[in-house]
Amino acid sequence: MNAPRFRNAARYWRSPLVPDADMVTAEYYDHAFTPHWHDAYTVPVIEAGAECYDYRGARYVAEAGTVPVINPGEVHTGARAVDAGWRYRVFYLPTAFVEELAREIAPRAASPWFAPGIIHDDDLARRLVAAHRALEGVEHGADPLAAETALVDALTTLLARHALDRPSPAPPAADAARVATMKSRLADDLLAPVTLAELARAVGLSAFHAARLFTRETGLAPHAWRNQLRIARALPALRGGASIADIAAACGFTDQSHFTRHFKRAFGVAPGRWRA
């Protein structure tokens, strides 16, 4: 007998105990996340089913009880790995918050970095789920002290057992400088149209080679990278309650439906649902 399918249902929420963090409680059947990144540590726990995702040039399958951590700013995808889909809980934790916890464990700790791959640690997974549920319970009157204690316990366990020091960046090569120039051109004015030919001329390459270099180094084609940046820049205004149509226009999307379509591919819900 086949396992029942999960629904496509997600709830994004926040807690005053973790300023600027986002949490999600979700299950997905046929939703597929397009390549995207978050300006935060992504710490999921798979509760049931299995998720597959592409990350740093490899494909991974995260099964129930595993913790597939993604570092800030790193491109990844997400889709079901089994017929039923998957259910998970996720912390999107600000880098400053995680770095402060790391310094409390080891005062000279550098920015924490997690190696590509899936963490198999049943005890850690239980602690993370307990913390997530406790934070969610505070919305309904549960003890905030107990929730915060569970959160600190879970995250310091994650850091102490599995975090590495962030690798030192290699000296910039000519290609890295070209990619940085193209990123700058794409980011300077999100409302202004930019052509691939303009990007290529800015770095002294043909359009073909510029597109191939950018995609190889960032994991996204130039237009996709720019749309992801637009979404990242939209989040503060979205949290602040601005009109979704106004946000879409201010960030360079064609219209509200264009913004909503790209947002849903990255977050699994429409921007109005994410904010609510």
Image (cartoon, rainbow, N blue to C red):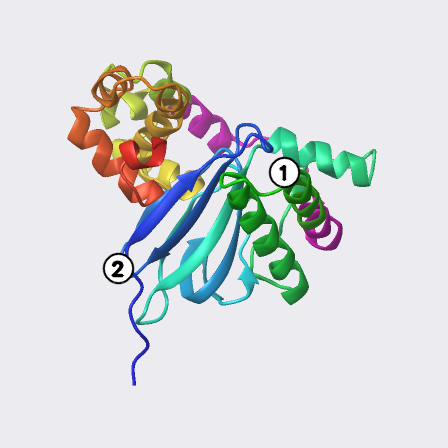
Q: Along the horizontal axis of the image, is 135 left or right of 258? A: right
Q: What amino acid does circle 1 point to?
A: Pro
- Residue 80 lies within the magenta run: no
Quadrant of the image for the C terminus? top left
Q: Separation of disc 1 and disc 2 at Cα?
A: 35 Å
Residue 83: horizontal and vertical position, in percent? 30, 72
How would you classify the magenta stretch by its main secondary structure?
Answer: helix
- Residue stretch in magenta: 155-183
- Farthest front residue? 141
**Residue nearest the viewer, comparing 7 with 265:** 7
Q: Along the horizontal axis of the image, is 104 left or right of 186? A: right
Disc 2 marks which residue?
30
- Residue 164 lies within the magenta run: yes
Q: What amino acid does circle 2 point to?
A: Asp
**Residue nearest the viewer, comparing 97 with 32:** 97
Q: Is residue 88 visible?
A: yes
Tell me the crowding category of disc 2: few under 14, some 14 to 19, or many 20 or more residues within 10 angstroms, Cα based.
Answer: some
The quadrant holding residue 249 is top left
Residue drawn at point x = 68 percent, y = 44 percent: 146
**Residue nearest the viewer, comparing 273 with 165:** 273
Mark 1 or 2, nearer chain start: 2
Residue drawn at point x = 33 percent, y = 77 percent: 3
Disc 1 marks which residue?
144
Residue 128: horizontal and vertical position, in percent? 60, 53
Q: Along the horizontal axis of the image, is 157 left or right of 14? A: right
